[in-house]
Amino acid sequence: MLCALADRGQASPRFAVPLNCNRDQLPAGPPSSIIGAQPGPTRIEELFMRRYDLIIRGGTVATAADTFSADLAVKDGKVAALGLGLDGADREIDATGHFVLPGGIDTHAHIEQIASNGMLNADTFETATRSAAFGGTTSVICFACQHRGDSLKAVYEDYSARARRGAIIDYSFHLLLTDPTPTVLNEELPPLVAEGNASIKVFMTYDLMNIGDEALLDILLKARELGALVAVHAENNGMISWLGKRLVERGYTDAKYHAVSHPRASEPEAINRLIAFAELLDQPVIVYHVATGEGAAVIREARGRGVKVYGETCTQYLFLTAQDLDRPGGEGAKWVCSPPLRTTADQEALWQALALGDLQLVSSDHAPYTLDERGKYAHGHVPSFKRTANGMPGLETRLPMLFDAMVTRGRFGINKFVQWTATEPARIYGLGDRKGTLAIGADADIAIWDPSQRVTLTDDLVHDNTGYTPFAGRTITGWPTTVLRRGETIIADGECQAAAGSGAYLPRRGGEAATPSGRLSPEFDPERNFGAKLY
Ligand code: DUC
Ligand code: ZN
Ligand code: ZN
């Protein structure tokens, strides 16, 4: 059996002091329990033997920094020990021949989200997070999505209640603002950020979602005051809207024209503008789903100047291209997402940007729609790209696709795999004190990977509610066979063992990534602006 679950039930009759056990830390007990020959184990021996809840034995542990052979012990949901020959647990998992990795953290997923046109996406918190768990992801940051006229507080409470009911993995929220009124910014936002939702998302495109330049400045400034990171969908709305109309007027409505309708320049233009704003106010930002080499280059240049700008790309931009949209009979709708899929040259540029640290993480941008009239085909079976729901599923396939490319095929290796999918997401979004690595005291969120398991991705293999995967037909090697969330096995033997609602809310502070650099722009620096106090 791959990665057998060996439930010992009883402590081993052999008394063995765990290698990392420090006798000074023994709990106080009567001396008689230490001295003297006894027929059975003493109380202290018992305590030694049952020191851990679980030992994952014989695996290869990898973090963003190291790869080493070790047993990993779990106690009370936390990593309690890493060492050789650990002993004394109620339960063991044999991980011989497997990688023992931190569970993935997906910081960009749309779950049970209502679009601006009222369409509900395909997944519930239960189905989305179950599919994430099957793919080795144990934490997710999704959105509390405000639409114009909504109270942010009411929106947040609604998403929060639904997540509490359904989530199987741990979760957190970005506060997605489309209507930053003074009430929202000054009354609703501050307590929500303080409660632990220290990231704000905004759109620079979409007619019903985008916020204009002045509102973006207002939000950046407010985020600076509150210590929140601002995450941005950066594309130029005017270019997209203008070119889209022109294409439709001329009858170019197939899915493939979606890629044409978002001119390449729309991405670097918006990223450049965003960075200019962020630099003006000295407010850290993260650019979502960078899809072009030019977009990544703008980030590289700004980071080189010391601007606190981070960048994310997504699985689909590393493995798919605009050619995937070119299918007959409306099938291309499956691959309609924004920004659109680009070229193989962009894929190379994005890998390079990750390698250079210009981009720091790879998310799924899971935005699931069914292949029927409730989703992708709400406007007919061969819908105009302009009327096709934007997005594709990816929570489950993100890690296996990347593992295959990075570990199995050897591009950048296991440590970068962990870094870009778990450690950096945790660091940037303020979860680094408990998630994203395997260290003593961290949450025991663990994915045990069989590096030799070959899997052909098919539409019915994945567990979300869309009924398809954009990567169908690919055979990849490496799969997470056992997944633990805070020490509890949630996936084993192809089954999900976790109950809906067993995922926990993860409050997040802004942390270092969201802290302004302190390098004031001339306009905001009283020493250079004739003494004006603008913060
Ligand atoms: N942007 C996202 O981030 N997700 C889905 C669609 C979109 O435009
Ligand atoms: Zn977006
Ligand atoms: Zn998204």
Image: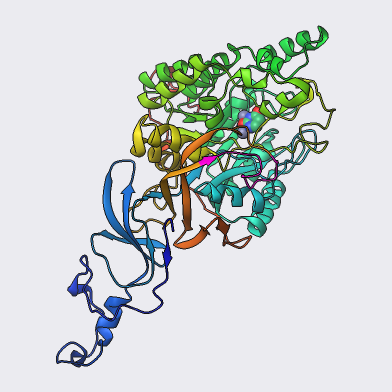
In screen coordinates, is 331 left or right of 362? right
Q: Quadrant of ligand 1?
A: top right
In screen coordinates, is 159 left or right of 342? right
Which residue is found at the position 55% from the left and 50% from the top? 134
Q: Nearer the viewer, residue 205 or 422?
A: 422
Q: Nearer the viewer, residue 151 or 318?
A: 318
Q: Is residue 220 visible?
A: no
Display colour scheme: rainbow
Which residue is found at the position 60% from the left and 14% from the top? 266
Q: How many marks?
A: 0
Does 175 appear in magenta?
no
Which residue is found at the position 69% from the left and 29% from the top? 334
Where the N terminus falls, by quadrant? bottom left
* Residue, far front: 1
* Residue, far right: 380
The image shows residue 30 at horizontal and vertical percentages of: 22, 90
Q: Nearer the viewer, residue 347 or 224?
A: 347
In screen coordinates, is 282 left or right of 501? left
The image shows residue 176 at horizontal and vertical percentages of: 64, 37
In screen coordinates, is 274 left or right of 73? right
The image shows residue 88 at horizontal and vertical percentages of: 30, 73
Q: Nearer the viewer, residue 462 or 174?
A: 462
Does 459 appear in magenta?
yes
* Residue, far left: 36
379 w.r.t. 492: above or below: above
Which residue is found at the position 84% from the left and 28% from the top? 379
341 w.r.t. 129: above or below: above
Q: Is residue 243 visible?
A: yes
- Image quadrant where residue 83 sits: bottom left
Q: Main secondary structure of the magenta part?
A: loop
- Image quadrant where residue 44 sits: bottom left
Residue range of the region highlighted in magenta in the rendering: 455-467
